[in-house]
Amino acid sequence: MIGAGAREHALALALSHDPAVTALACAPGNAGTAALAEQLGVDVTDPAALAKLATAWSADLVVIGPELPLVAGGADAVRAAGIACFGPSAGAARIEGSKAFAKDVMTAAGVPTARSELVDNPGRLDVALNHFGPPWVVKDDRLAAGKGVVVTEDLEVARVHALTLLDGGHPVLLESYLDGPEVSLFCLVDANATVVPLLPAQDFKRVGDGDAGPNTGGMGAYAPLPWAPESLAGDVVHRIVAPVVAELARRGVPFTGLLYAGLGLTTAGPQVIEFNCRFGDPETQVVLALLRTPLAGLLMATVIGALAQQPPLQWDPGAAVVVVMAAEGYPGTPRTGDVITGADGPGVLHAGTRRRDDGAVVSAGGRVLAVVGTGADLAGAREHAYQRVQRVHLPGGHYRSDIGLPATRRDNGRFGAR
Ligand code: AMP
Ligand code: GLY
């Protein structure tokens, strides 16, 4: 398992529950994965180092969690060393690594998405902004861990964000605004282009309750979506994911691994906000909390092109909620080194944590912990998650108190990931 976040802790936990897994190592891992797996040191962005480590450890399967090693070619290097790897090639990972490439693929595949314009010259910015908004959607074209996007009703705020990016030499993508609730749909995609959707989930991206404040990497999530039509996943696979998978194959960069469709459910139907080339964080923490099918076998079936032969996925009938506990200062510069207590035991996944030499677990990143609750329904899962949050102490930490709440109140369209 490559990576160090709560997503990787959730993946490692699910892998460790699969009876087919005889040994598990995480690189670099965190204080949470250390309890489940051997910890190995590695620079995840160095493909040759990943291949070397996997070879030295005699891994049967390497699972790459984050986007950076995938975009850098980590999966290619591991496969070139003769080891099975869950994750797309660098060429296919561009679906996340370059928003302009993703738009081009979607246009060619006839997939509905926001209208967009790439601006690389400050002199053209005002004319381009005039073609959009309000609200204006201004994005950094590079990977920005969810933090490069500004959505605003204020033209001046949009201009300033775009100019800051342009001044730094980074092209800016302007997009039309997609209204309606957001949905994350994760799809396993194998080498034969078989697509298997997981449960739809919803992510809460803004830092504050009621969707106040700036975007983050994700402050919480829930699954499944009690308000979504039964047909949603199948519909999205048919209209959006399968055509994109076919287009990538046609371009000579077939996608295998997990393709994450970030969607806006607009009045005109589902439209793509973004594609990611990996499991989402924090949605993975809730999706895997409900998955009963052993994970390692499922990922291996994806790698070897055998998804069509797999039995249907098995899910817990209930619901799951994850609440992210973030460090003081996040999503700006987080304070680190705070001693965390009450985080031992089930339900608490580690993200930015580290075990100090004296044995104390301390914060070591922006998103520090991900607290997961399950229940018979969404309200029950929320209750369990927030009860567990109360028992964790992270000095200066903050979390949202309304994860999944709008969906329990049947007013999902009004706020809470819209
Ligand atoms: P991205 O980095 O592209 O995932 O964008 C981060 C967040 O910004 C998304 O999850 C949405 O909440 C919001 N967003 C991005 N693009 C759009 C759009 N075209 N319309 C509405 N909201 C958007
Ligand atoms: N949940 C948002 C992401 O993983 O990009």
Image: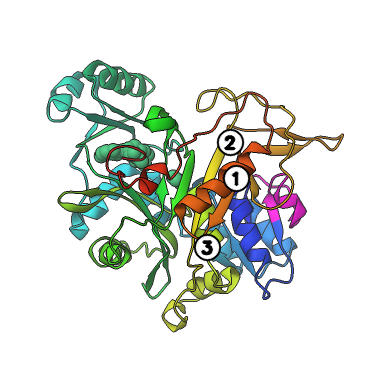
Secondary structure type for disc 1: strand
Can see residue 131?
A: yes
Where residue 131 sits, quadrant-wise, is: top left
What residue is shown at x 67% (from left), y 67% (from top)?
17
Which residue is the site of mark 3? 290
Query: Looking at mark 1, is its residue's CB closer than 8 Å to ligand 2?
Result: no
Quadrant of ligand 2 in image: top left
Q: Which amino acid does the dot numbered 3 rest on? A: Leu
- Region rendered in magenta: 26-45
> Helix or strand or loop: what does disc 3 sit on?
helix
The residue pinned by badge 2 equals: 325
Q: Quadrant of the C terminus?
A: top left
Q: Nearer the viewer, residue 359 or 267?
A: 267
Distance CA(mark 1)–CA(mark 3): 15 Å
Mark 2: C-beta under 8 Å from nearest atom of ligand 2: no
Question: What residue would you read off at disc 1?
Answer: 371
Label 2 – label 3 distance at C-alpha: 21 Å
